[in-house]
């Protein structure tokens, strides 16, 4: 088999066989297929597409390109959750303790921030002492003991995806449904969960900007999960507005803790509780109504908050942060961003707001950048809210005062104002499962 022939076949719009896809992935991982040929095939896939069978085969082959985690030693149905990424998306910090408190084990591997979107692992590392680099044995032992662990992905989990993504990132081949779906699902499958809930974001703060594209991505990922024997559902959620009020690592952890105390923002609570209920459904805890009741009880009783404390303890963090937020530390510079006019906030370019938080130090501008855990943005006014001239819309936090003018300039590009209140879209837009698309 020659790589030239595989490239030519896909260039001409033909379907690749399982053996041809495996030849490509194996050869690229081993180094026998050079970057220039891999780039050519990726561009051919980007332009000509892949069908459902090809996409599922690519995913399975990438999932098996390195280590796979066997969660068989953990009793019960293991349900994983993945978000496609958004600004202010700290739902894992809320959902995982709730689901574990309701008796469904959560063994979750999460990632770091990517571009304008924050990463769960970065947020957890804002907790003093918290250990995200667990061995597989430590990871499984924690879930066996307390029903919960959230850790960073191992270095050899789906290495084909890591290598291919780096190439896609520099060859303008990232934004393809099959390639995005296989990238996400290969890691989820290799992580060993029995069932998967996907939170597919849509809007200005998401990678998929339109509802229709988000639905297509959700359908592709659900199809992959079902084809490889993992029951999968996807919830399409709104990301034209940041989720919650906090953007930045320590700020988001605090907001997540507040939500587990029943004191979080309504939008964050709505999305988190819906996703938690879906995980409990897949975990065999009854119909959706019963699972929503279980979620509510876990929060009201304090069981979910206690589960978070247990996870922090198990992963060597200081669980006192749950009651003493000063342990997170605070930024030495604060600056209020005010409304220039009287009227309404018509819209927010959520990705631009995410970029402003990166400028302040809350994210990485390069792979080598370090994160300032106390940096970020607290929003007080969001889309649809009325403002008067001079009202504080947000407070910026940073330990780099010289970055404030640049961040303010970016913030000014993020907000659009109008004389009348805009129409607000619902937070949860659709559900995609093996039976089809169910729009809300």
Image (cartoon, rainbow, N blue to C red):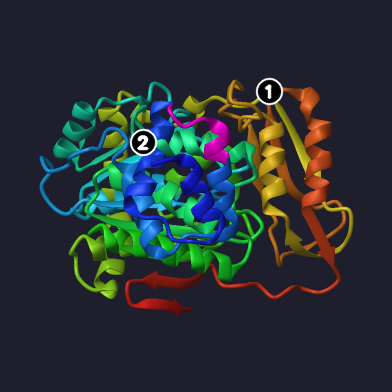
Q: Which mark is residue 388?
A: none
Region in magenta = 32-39
Q: Which residue is mark 1?
A: 399
In terms of sequence position, does the residue under pointer 2 or pointer 1 come before the other?
2
Q: Residues within 10 Å of mark 2 (few under 14, many from 20)?
A: some
Assign the N terminus to one quadrant of the image.
top left
Q: Is residue 225 above or below residue 147?
A: below
Magenta-drawn stretch contains 134: no
Camera sees residue 15: yes
Q: Which residue is mark 2?
A: 26
Quick check: 301 left or right of 323?
left
How many discs mark residues in the rendered view? Answer: 2
Residue at 48 percent across and 56 percent down: it is: 178
**Residue 102 rendering spot, x and y as whole percentages:** 22, 55
Residue at 50 percent across and 42 percent down: it is: 4
Residue closest to the eye, 229 or 323: 229
Quick check: 205 left or right of 337?
left
What distance separates the C-alpha of mark 2 from that of mark 1?
Answer: 46 Å
Q: Is residue 405 above or below residue 168?
A: above
Residue closest to the eye, 307 or 219: 219
Camera sees residue 297: no
Residue closest to the eye, 300 or 133: 133
Residue at 24 percent across and 45 percent down: it is: 192
Give SS at disc 2. helix
Give SS at disc 1. loop
């Amino acid at each position: 088999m020659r790589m030239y022939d595989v490239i030519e076949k896909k260039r001409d719009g033909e379907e690749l066989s399982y053996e041809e896809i495996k030849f490509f992935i194996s050869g690229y991982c081993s180094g026998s297929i050079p970057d220039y040929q891999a780039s050519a095939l990726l561009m051919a896939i980007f332009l000509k597409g892949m069908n459902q069978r090809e996409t599922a085969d690519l995913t399975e082959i990438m999932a098996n390109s390195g280590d796979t985690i066997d969660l068989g030693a953990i009793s019960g149905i293991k349900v994983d959750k993945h978000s496609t990424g958004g600004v202010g998306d700290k739902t894992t910090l809320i959902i995982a303790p709730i689901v574990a408190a309701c008796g469904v084990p959560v063994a979750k591997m999460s990632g770091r921030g990517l571009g304008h979107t924050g990463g769960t692992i970065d947020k957890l590392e804002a907790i003093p002492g918290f250990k995200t680099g667990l061995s597989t044995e430590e990871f499984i032992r924690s879930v066996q003991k307390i029903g919960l662990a959230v850790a960073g992905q191992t270095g050899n989990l789906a290495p084909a995806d890591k290598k291919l993504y780096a190439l896609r990132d520099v060859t303008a081949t990232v934004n393809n449904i099959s390639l995005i779906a296989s990238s996400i699902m290969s890691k989820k499958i290799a992580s060993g969960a029995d069932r998967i809930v996907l939170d597919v974001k849509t809007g200005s703060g998401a990678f998929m900007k339109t509802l229709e594209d988000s639905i297509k991505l959700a359908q592709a990922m659900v199809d992959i999960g079902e084809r490889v024997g993992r029951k999968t559902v996807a919830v399409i959620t709104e990301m034209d507005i940041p989720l919650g009020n906090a953007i930045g690592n320590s700020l988001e952890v605090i907001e997540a803790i507040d939500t587990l105390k029943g004191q979080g923002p309504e939008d964050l609570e709505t999305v988190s509780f819906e996703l938690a209920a879906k995980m409990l459904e897949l975990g065999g805890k009854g119909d959706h109504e019963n699972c929503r009741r279980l979620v509510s009880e876990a929060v009201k009783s304090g069981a979910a908050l206690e589960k978070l404390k247990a996870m922090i303890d198990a992963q060597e963090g200081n669980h006192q942060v749950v009651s003493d937020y000063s342990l997170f530390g605070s930024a030495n510079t604060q600056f209020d961003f005010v409304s220039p006019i009287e009227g309404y906030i018509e819209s927010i370019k959520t990705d631009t707001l995410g970029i402003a938080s990166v400028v302040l130090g809350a994210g990485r501008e390069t792979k080598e950048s370090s994160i300032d855990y106390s940096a970020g943005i607290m929003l007080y006014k969001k889309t649809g809210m009325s403002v008067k001239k001079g009202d504080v819309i947000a407070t910026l936090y940073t330990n780099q005062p010289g970055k404030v003018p640049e961040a303010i300039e970016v913030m000014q590009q993020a907000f659009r104002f109008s004389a009348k209140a805009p129409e607000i879209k619902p937070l949860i837009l659709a559900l995609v499962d093996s039976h089809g698309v169910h729009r809300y």
